[in-house]
Amino acid sequence: MINIFRLFIVKSMDILRRGGYCTEIFPLAFACDSSAANLRHELMQHHRIIELEAFPERDNEKKRVFEAVKMSVCILFAQKSAAQGQFTLRIHHDRYVDTSNQKVVLHPLTIRTIDEKHCTIPLLTPDDLSILEHLYRVGAPLRNVGHCYTGEIDLSLDKALLTDDSKKAVMVKGAILDRYQIRKAMSQGEIMFLDAKKYLANNRGERSLHHKNQRIVLQGITGVNEKTRLKMTLVKPGTFCANSVNYVLISNPQIVPEYLLGVLNSKIMNFTFSLTSTNSNVNGYEVDNLPIVIADRRIQESVAKLVTRILEAKDRQEGVSTDKLEGEVEQIVSTLYRLNDEQIARIANHGQGHAIANVTDEP
């Protein structure tokens, strides 16, 4: 279902005369959601965004723009003009526009450098922007070396194929996944197995064969205010994924899976994701756009050895600290992305102040 705010913006530009202005308030999903990608392309190519004031979702009703509505919103100031140019973005943490809050200046070319396909408008500060631009200059979108899919087993439509019989095929749900591990027990729900024979008899498409590969799996939904949004690990061939799980299938044979896992679980990728994702879903298109550095084989194998030790330690003992090993991975990844000490510190401390809260495309 289309969110009607998108129609209002298009109609506003249609009825304005050349050089006319409009100001409207609507869901903040406009900035980042893939469903608004064509609209962002249209505004940036054929019109002019002047200002965007963002009001992330907050639990405190007294700080909401609309007290009874939890949804985050934004105010767009735009002009019907062919003169493309830079625009300003400002994030507010109360119900009013606070002129003391820092503005960041964005340009359509910058937006396309970060996300050419969807023209995502990141919610950030000037300091964050300089780091984000640097990361996308150094790395290339993950879609160049792989693709992020939604789990192949629909927990509703395939319910009849699910069982508690541990002799059946292993199936992972999102709630059981964490960084570098599959927990022994679920935080919610129950562990289920899959009648793979029946599933494969009725599903013969390409994705039904993905279980034969080693895959990087991640939670499909995480709390927007969680400091760590990307929670990934590896599953063995023969493991099936529920649709509460996303998974990365690597298409480039030069990429060592454990190396890519170490990069994706890094603070650098979590920082990047937090600026360009504004809803609780960890969407595949967002993961596909993460900037990945492809290191030479020697460095990949060095990272892979560390990651393997982390995976083995967490498999042997749930809750064991692997901070030292993860720190070594982080240090190598930071070097690959050519980050200086100030940038590393900012990435490590990101999110400790105001959190970017939940934004959805649903009314």
Image: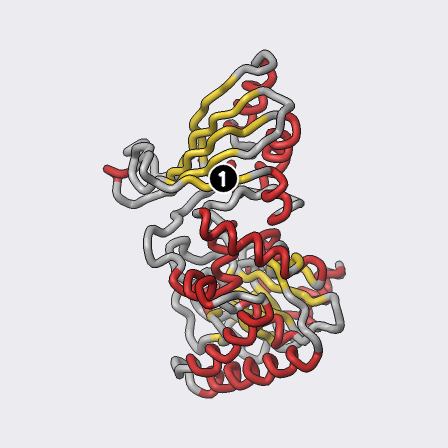
**Residue 310 location (% of width, % of height):** 50, 82
**Quadrant of res 342:** bottom left
Colour scheme employed for the rendering of this structure: secondary structure
Does 283 sit above or below residue 311?
above
Instruction: Note whether residue 258 is visible.
Output: yes
Determine whether, in the image, residue 60 is placed left or right of residue 275.
left
**Residue 227 location (% of width, % of height):** 39, 61
Does 37 sit above or below residue 177?
above
Does 230 sit above or below residue 22?
below
- At x 54% / y 54%, what residue is drawn? 132
Instruction: Note whether residue 68 is visible.
Output: no
The residue that mark 1 highlights is 105
> Which residue occupies the foreground of this view, 189 or 82?
82
- At x 52% / y 77%, what residue is drawn? 329
Q: Residue furthest left?
A: 62
> Which residue occupies the foreground of this view, 88 or 93?
88
**Residue 268 location (% of width, % of height):** 51, 64
Number of residue marks: 1
Q: Quadrant of the C terminus?
A: top left
Amino acid type, callout 1: Val
**Residue 257 location (% of width, % of height):** 65, 74
- At x 47% / y 52%, what residue is drawn? 128
Callout 1: few (<14), some (14-19), or many (20+) C-alpha neighbours within 10 Å?
some
Assign a secondary structure to mark 1.
Answer: strand
Q: Quadrant of the N terminus?
A: top right
Determine whether, in the image, residue 311 is placed left or right of residue 318.
right
**Quadrant of res 308:** bottom right
> Which residue occupies the foreground of this view, 142 or 187?
142
- At x 48% / y 82%, what residue is drawn? 325
